[in-house]
Image (spheres, grey):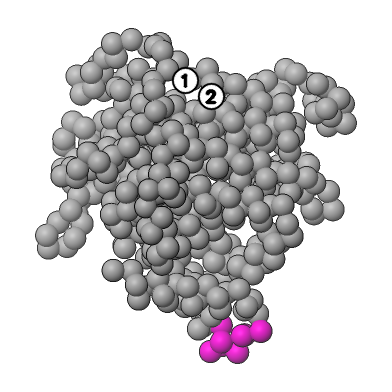
Amino acid sequence: MRKYFQFEELGTNYRREIIGGLTTFLAMAYILIVNPLMLSLDGVEGIPDAMRMDKGAVFVATALAAAVGSLFMGFIARYPIALAPGMGLNAFFAFTVVLGYGVPWPTALTGVLFSGLIFIVLSLTGLRETIINAIPAQLKYAVGAGIGLFITFLGFQNANIIVGDPNTLVALGDLTQGSTLLAIFGLVITVIMMVRKINGAIFYGMIATTVLGMIVGLIGLPEKVVSGIPSVAPTFGVAFDAIFQDPASLFTAQFLVIVITFLFVDFFDTAGTLVAVANQAGLMKNDKLPRAGKALLSDSLATVTGAVFGTSTTTSYIESSSGVAAGARTGFASVVTGCLFLLALFFSPLLMVVTSEVTAPALIIVGVLMVSSLGNIEWKNFEIAVPAFFTIISMPLSYSIATGIAIGFIFYPITMILSGRRKEVHPIMYGLWVIFILYFIFLK
């Protein structure tokens, strides 16, 4: 085991790897709570139950996808990078595809499955480099920042800090309500721990908020802490239903955009995370990432696995950097994280006491982390600033990640051509321009 993971070459040992894997798990364990609430559209009123995914089944699917994905990354790519259903992609799945477009969640899972299969093909060929180079870095940064704003907006909504208003569309909510005050407490305590650089701050913040909610009577006590694993039957294999029962639903411009969006965000989010964590761990060689193909393949296999179990896109987590900071240098740390996610399957009763007010601070903080990419955008170049800004601002205002990407990708070729920089636009970008124009034409 030590030889396979190159402990001696990388100057590590079992203790450092185990501590690193545990640290990464604590930093990203919030997804076990947030993802089921997100995909079940918890807190959204007035919608039929058929639009909601089963919380227990999604909890199991989330834990299994994270476990399998982390084990893939650990054993195949041997990197200290853990995986789980991605924030932003789950918001796109629930609030844009299902709630916004009215696409049944089983069909949305089929979209995740297709994007994962395409990702596998791209990972096994040289096409991934071509596509990475085709999409300008400025738009990649803009997409990440826009998703961050969208997630933060969701967090404020779930906490009722921001509410709907018939005159101004949105307004400040009643900050004297108990549930809103509880969310504000969670936000403050999480910010304090983040500033103090406490590993797992988001997870601990949710625990502290839940405990306070129980003390003041806003949250009920759990009947038990440990139990049997909930059934994954309500979501397992449902991704194949549309293929065999309603194949016509897959041959639409809308479904194509859904697949492209899942693929695009996962593809570049994974690439960015791999480079960032590998740099931090000192694993880059000559500015290149060794075993990059295996890492991308591990990520794509995790997405397919997650879709089969019944969850939105599984992707590499930047929270893995906390494990690297704690000493992790090899894939053994990811194996430890994966095993901990399997152990977490037995703690599903705790999910029942977590409310949207408890998870709201986590969404807001994740949004803060994601908008850091704003600093990398060339704002002084107007031909870059326009598509980047439209991408970012359109996501929260249109309540759609896909719409933001589409608008930005439409404006980018236009502004670049008019500024005399058309040679810098890759032919693939013109193809995407046509696809997204058709997306708006046939959206309705």
Q: Can residue 393 be seen from the camera position used here?
A: no
Relative image position of residue 78 (x, y in whole percent): 74, 34
Instruction: Give the answer, above or below, for where 288 lies relative to 137.
Output: above
The residues colored magenta run 416-423
Q: Percent position (x, y) of residue 285?
A: 83, 48
Residue in the image at 16% along x and 35% along y: 177
Which residue reaches farthest left? 166
Q: Are marks 2 and 1 in contact (CB under 8 Å)?
A: yes
Does residue 418 belong to the magenta stretch? yes
User: Secondary structure beneath disc 1?
Assistant: helix
Who's the residue at 30% across and 58% down the image? 101
Tag count in the figure? 2
Camera-side residue of 412 and 299: 299
Q: Is residue 24 left or right of residue 101?
A: right
Which residue has dot 2 on it?
Answer: 341
Residue under pointer 1: 345
